[in-house]
Image: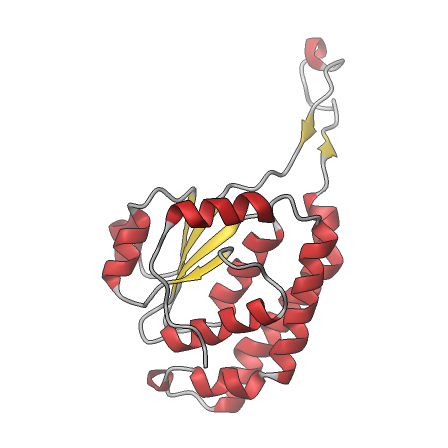
Amino acid sequence: MPQAAQQLSLDAVRAAQAEWCRTALPDRLRIIRKLRHHLATDALKLLDAFPRTLERSRSDSLTAEIIPLAEACRFLELEAERILRPARLSARGRPVWLRSVDVEVRREPLGIVLLIGPSNYPLFLTGVQTIQALVAGNAVVLKPGSGAAKLAAVFAELIRKAGLPDGVLTVLDDSVAAGREAIHSGVNKIVLTGSVESGRAVL
């Protein structure tokens, strides 16, 4: 059975993120690769958890959400190292007096990322955002879209089965109150997929 939605304990999440961000990128990507395999082998479990309010066939959910999420995992497996490695900026376009200065961009984890998910593509959209944040070394607090709590719990179960350490991903219930509490908890970044009205409310 998937785990029930968790209560938000930011201290515990911060402690888990501090450990997770020290995990080498190849080790993080190994978990993403295992997740990709679980998306294939446990696809039926995911399909059973999709909200019935979507009024979508199982084959549509498979082709519109599960397969693209597996492909997003594959993309990160192939490209994350290049995307996240430090990059030196060219002196081209800088003023003459700054051309001798070395500039390097380093991609550092933000800390705790709160994802507020939609109800129309509840697995693919939040799933992609979750794996991107995790690969970059962040912890994730996921507030599923309305009706998608069961699906989010199954997805989190698959990531844990793939080897994600405890505390790095927290799944809340799908209520507005859970999202409001998470917003005010002191997370480092909020990612919202939703309507203009929802965006204004979060802002």
Residue toward you, 79 or 35: 35
Identify the image quadrant of the N terminus: bottom left
Outermost residue on the top side: it is: 97
Residue toward you, 182 or 74: 182
Locate residue 119: give its quadrant: bottom left
Residue 37 position (above or below residue 91): below
Residue 195: give x, y in percent of width and height: 32, 61
Residue at 37%, 74% (x, y): give it.
148
Residue at 43%, 60% (x, y): give it.
170
User: In the image, 65: left or right of 186?
Assistant: right
- Please state the total of marks drawn on the protein image: 0
Residue 69: give x, y in percent of width and height: 59, 71
Residue at 49%, 66% (x, y): give it.
125
Residue toward you, 16 or 125: 16
Residue at 56%, 67% (x, y): give it.
160
Residue 98 position (above or below residue 191): above
Taking the image as drawn, is residue 181 in sight? yes
Taking the image as drawn, is residue 122 in sight? no
User: In the image, 170: left or right of 29?
Assistant: left
